[in-house]
Image: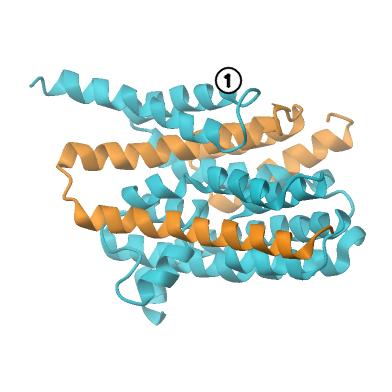
Chain colours: A cyan, B orange
Amino acid sequence: MSSIYRTLAGGTLRDIALACLAVWFIGLSYGAIAVASGFPLWVPAAQSVLVLAGASEFLFVGIVAAGGNPLAAAAAGLLVNARHLPYGLALPDNLTGRGWRRLLGSHVMNDESVVFALAQEDLPRKRAAYWACGLGVLLCWPAGAVLGALIGSVIGNTGAFGLDAMFPAVILALIVPALRDRVTLRAALIGAVIALAATPFLPAGLPVLLALTGVLAVIIDQARQAPR
Amino acid sequence: MKDTTLVVAGMLTLSAGTFAIRFSGPVLRRRITFPPWAEKLLEAGAVVLLAGLVATTALTEGHGFAGPARPAGVLAGGVLAWRKAPFLVVVLAAAATTAVLRLLGVP
């Protein structure tokens, strides 16, 4: 993995470290909430390593704590995680590695590693950013969750520190360069509005997938520029 | 916690299913060669998905509005990012804006 340090500029590595720190903070609140909801420590600890997808884990814990069936909670979590399929299609070929590495490379696919990879200009940098961020999240998310579960109620209200604003801000900061393209910006705005409009009515996860309909704006633009 | 076996079954279902979703994207990608316009569409698709994720996580909690403090923080971060402020500044400004608003009693 030493090639990561040679390939990536210091600024990018620092940004990845900060994103991982934000993940660690969110992990703290996840572990604390899970224990406060009546789960033993091993539940958030095992989930954070095996699932490694924050939103779906919060949802799973919330549904089961509210008395829901764990298998139904798992189905809801899978719906939230369905966005990883189009992520995998968008990543350049072989970014997630070959052979046995592909197992780990697939597991560390998450919002942060994908967005850092897309933000880089060439393939070696994309690959280095993807792995650095993916492995960083693999360390920070479980570490935060376990510590949060251990100190539990001590943290109290993480909302007071504005930590819940960090995740959307991290993702937004990283897609801003792509949004300077007018067609992509229009598609993203349409997608965001559709996702927001659907949120009150649909189960968690589905609104974000519906945002994909925003790419119709890109299709229309492509059709206009190259009439077939 | 209620029935431990059932909870473990749920956890394993979520873990295995999530891995299968993550694994299949790159595999499908390797099987198919996409023309350039489709490649651009796939990358735009990822950006659009992430934008949907930003909008819903910034503005909503469960099925309702999250309150103004969080989206205000994310907006402050977004404006700074658009003006090419460093990443660290963007993320800390978002958290700080939300924290200060909450300190002032904004939900």
| In this picture, residue A25 sits left or right of residue A85 | right
Total marks placed: 1
Name the quadrant of the C terminus of chain A: top left
Q: Quarter-wise, where is residue B36 in the image?
A: top left
Place of residue B78 in the rendered image (x, y in percent of width and height, measured from the top left): 56, 36
Place of residue B21 in the rendered image (x, y in percent of width and height, measured from the top left): 44, 54
Observer-nearest residue: B13 or A161? B13
The subunit letter for the residue under badge 1 reads: A
The vertical placement of A152 against B34, above or below, is below
The vertical placement of A156 against B47, above or below, is below
Observer-nearest residue: A108 or A164? A108
Q: Quarter-wise, where is residue B27 in the image?
A: bottom left
The vertical placement of A110 against B45, above or below, is below
Q: Which residue is drawn at 74% across and 52% down?
A: A61
Q: Residue at x 55, y 50 (%)?
A: B87
Q: Which residue is drawn at 69% across and 36% down?
A: B73
Q: Mark 1 points at which residue?
A: A197
